[in-house]
Image (cartoon, helix red, strand yellow):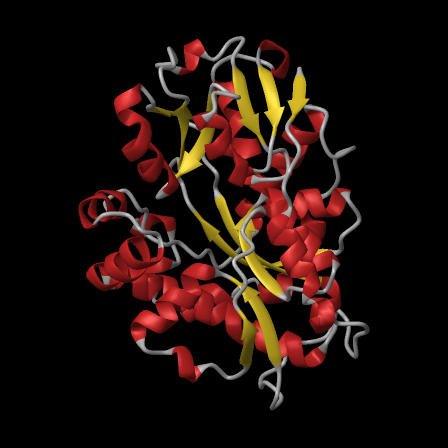
Amino acid sequence: MRSAIPGLGLVLAAALLVAGCATKGGDTDLSAALPTSVPPGTKLSISVNTTRVALEASGQSNTLPFTVSDWPVVQAGPDVIQAFRGGALDVATNAGIPPIHAHATGVDAKIVGVKVRSTPLYQLATAPNSAINSLSDLRGKRIGFSPGQAQGVVVLRTLQAAGLSVSDVKLVELNSPQFLTALQGKQIDVAPLAEPQLTLYLAQYGEQGARGVKTPAVDALTILWAPTAVLQDSGKLAAITEFVKIWARTDIWAWEHPDQWLDAYYVKDQKVTPDSARRILSTVEKPYYPAKWDDAIKWEQETIDLVTRSGYFGSSFDAAQLFDRRFEQLASDAVPAQYRTKESQ
């Protein structure tokens, strides 16, 4: 059963106001070799907050071979898709599900970077005074569900692991930024939250019985993606080629400089306490950037089949369509060898 609470769309509205950066037409195609240098004056609008913070914290903000016109914080997959549609954003990071959602809604975009994880990122946060203590308590409960975001896939995979179907629960369709308000108001019983949002929520409502329930569902992919129209602009293509490398390298910098990252990102940017930041950081998985995307494409295909079988996003399709394999080795080649193989984790 599904129900819905209307979305606010504030981030989307703001993004579309700056649609003047749209790429109207391209001078290259998706079969062209990747450029080796960035033309002077090239600009990108980038929604990758962790990279912005890492560049600032490491003192590398002024070393980019292109200009960042802005760093909008457009995180939810549906909002990123609408910003892509309006030409307000050139490149963003998300989980694996937003490109599937984009494909289903006619937004042509490609994955240009892949990072893989093997441990759960989310827990199921419960409403205050909830009686939910384990996955077996989910039957009949109202679950915050965003079908176009990673959280939606986590819910579907969690139900699968618990031996439940979507008809055994009540899926309340929300955009993920609405989860906190819905939990606080007891409009839903449970919703998937990742760090640091989980810690911030439990710090406020833990004494009222809110808790985090672990799920085995793994959200395996963190991806970097861009509209096809942007990739058909030779200047922006060159800048994104360089940004893929920067994206991976700054992630490694954060991993190798935990004290600086803890202070810059978790404490100053995300507003969690130093003690909470240390606990969160201890759960972060070592970065892994695969040299080949075969396993990532396989996982994406499984996700496509899961969401379409559950009644979302139409019919299944070939996951390989979502990836621009010209970029396949860029992130991997940009980082030291120990971050390129699963065996190193």
Q: Nearer the viewer, residue 213 or 186?
A: 186
Q: Nearer the viewer, residue 20 or 51?
A: 20
Q: Is residue 323 visible?
A: no
The relative height of residue 283 versus residue 36 in the rendered view (above or below) is above
State which quadrant residue 299 falls in: top right
Kindly give the residue lying farthest to the bottom in the view shown: 40
Q: Please report the residue visible at 63 percent of the width from the left and 81 percent of the height from the top.
A: 35
The relative height of residue 312 versus residue 251 in the rendered view (above or below) is above
Query: In the displayed structure, does residue 260 sit left or right of residue 139?
Result: left
Q: Is residue 49 visible?
A: yes
Where residue 221 appears, x then y in whole percent?
A: 50, 46
Where residue 287 appears, x then y in whole percent?
A: 36, 54
How many marks overall?
A: 0
Q: Please report the residue visible at 67 percent of the width from the left and 81 percent of the height from the top.
A: 235
Query: In the displayed structure, does residue 323 sit left or right of residue 345?
Result: right
Q: Nearer the viewer, residue 216 or 179?
A: 179
State which quadrant residue 248 falls in: bottom left
Query: In the displayed structure, does residue 90 sit left or right of residue 245?
Result: right
Where residue 92 appears, x then y in whole percent?
A: 57, 59
Where residue 230 appears, x then y in whole percent?
A: 70, 69
The relative height of residue 203 versus residue 310 in the rendered view (above or below) is below
